[in-house]
Image (cartoon, rainbow, N blue to C red):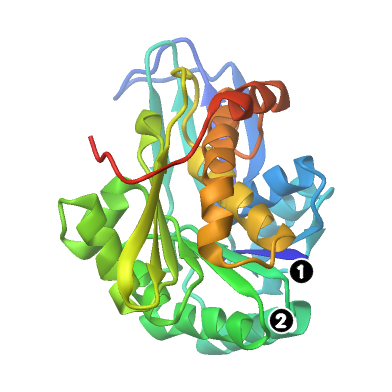
Amino acid sequence: MILTITPNPALDVTYHLPRGQWGEVNRVETVSETAGGKGVNVARVLHRLGEAVACTGFLGGDTGDRLRALLSDVDQRWVPIPSPTRRTTAVVDADTTTLFNEPGPAVSESAWERLCALTADAVGDGDVVTVSGSMPPGTGDEALASVVGAARRRGARVVVDTSGPHLLAAARAGATLLKPNHHELRAATGCDDLAAGAQRLLDEGAAGVVVSRAEAGMIALVADSGRPQRTWQARPVELVHGNPTGAGDAAVAALARALHRNSRPLPDILAEQLADAVALSAAAVARPVAGEVDLDMYARTRASVVASPGLDQH
């Protein structure tokens, strides 16, 4: 099984209107709602691919109830909290998309302990846990580390997609894979050189790092028992236009699926499956809503993408 953890989920609300005007009355033409949060998107992609997946994290209030109802086709194992789940609001007009992201509720230490216990009960040897997105306000490094540790002690592999100090905390906790984008990697490590930044995370304790670089594809680096790091790169053959919001989440889904299906060493898995992560990311860009993938485009792109050893960071 794959367990996706979203510590700070959101009810995504989108307003569509012809043209937005600051300081004026704006009349919205249509409103849509979706279950949001990066881990929720990962779960939706995995479910679409037919994988056994469950979704957890913290959920509360009326917005949490609405999110749960919108995600009814996915196995949900949320930890209840008293404060309402946040909303993200997108205002979409003919020219731009403007996002308003609420910070989300603070989460108590006891709620994090319940999440650790749920994780330990849910997974075992051969399972995969993903932790995706921002952390609730006030979350300390030890909270994320405790979740990673609980999964690792049960024999599960752990993929973490977050940012800032929490990325370093996940590395120190021994995450199997970290998947920042190139901006997040530079911000977290202070290294302009992507290989140096990834090496910093490997030195901190992560087993592997996959860095997404938008249309430039992805690079992967793996620690190899004290020897020089092993590296690969893969990029799409053609540029895909669309909505990039869920591309990184689709990549996490691809990597989690690869880890779940293969018990082989991490370098062997990445050498074969990095191209799959790039293809599934492109298939997500082709869809208008994060958490969806165009399976026809995925099949076409996967046939043409190849991972090669070495790095080209430009």
Residue 219, given in percent of the width and then of the height, sits at 38, 46
Using the image, tell me which numbered label, if any, was put on residue 118. 2
Q: Amino acid at mark 1?
A: Arg
Residue located 71% across and 69% down the image: 78
Residue located 59% across and 82% down the image: 152
Q: Viewed as shown, does residue 98 lie left or right of 124?
A: left
Q: How many marks?
A: 2
Nearest the viewer among 53 and 112 is 53
Residue 260 occupies quadrant: bottom right
Residue 140 occupies quadrant: bottom left
Nearest the viewer among 68 and 274 is 274
Residue 22, given in percent of the width and then of the height, sits at 30, 23
Q: Eyeballing the image, is 33 above or below 169? A: above
Nearest the viewer among 210 and 93 is 210
Residue 313, given in percent of the width and then of the height, sits at 25, 40
Q: Amino acid at mark 2?
A: Leu
Q: Eyeballing the image, is 96 above or below 107? A: above
Give the spatial CA distance, label 2 vs label 1: 8 Å
Using the image, tell me which numbered label, if any, was put on residue 77. 1
The answer to whether marks 2 and 1 mark residues whose Cβ atoms lie closer than 8 Å is yes
Instruction: Please identify the quadrant where the C terminus is shown.
Output: top left
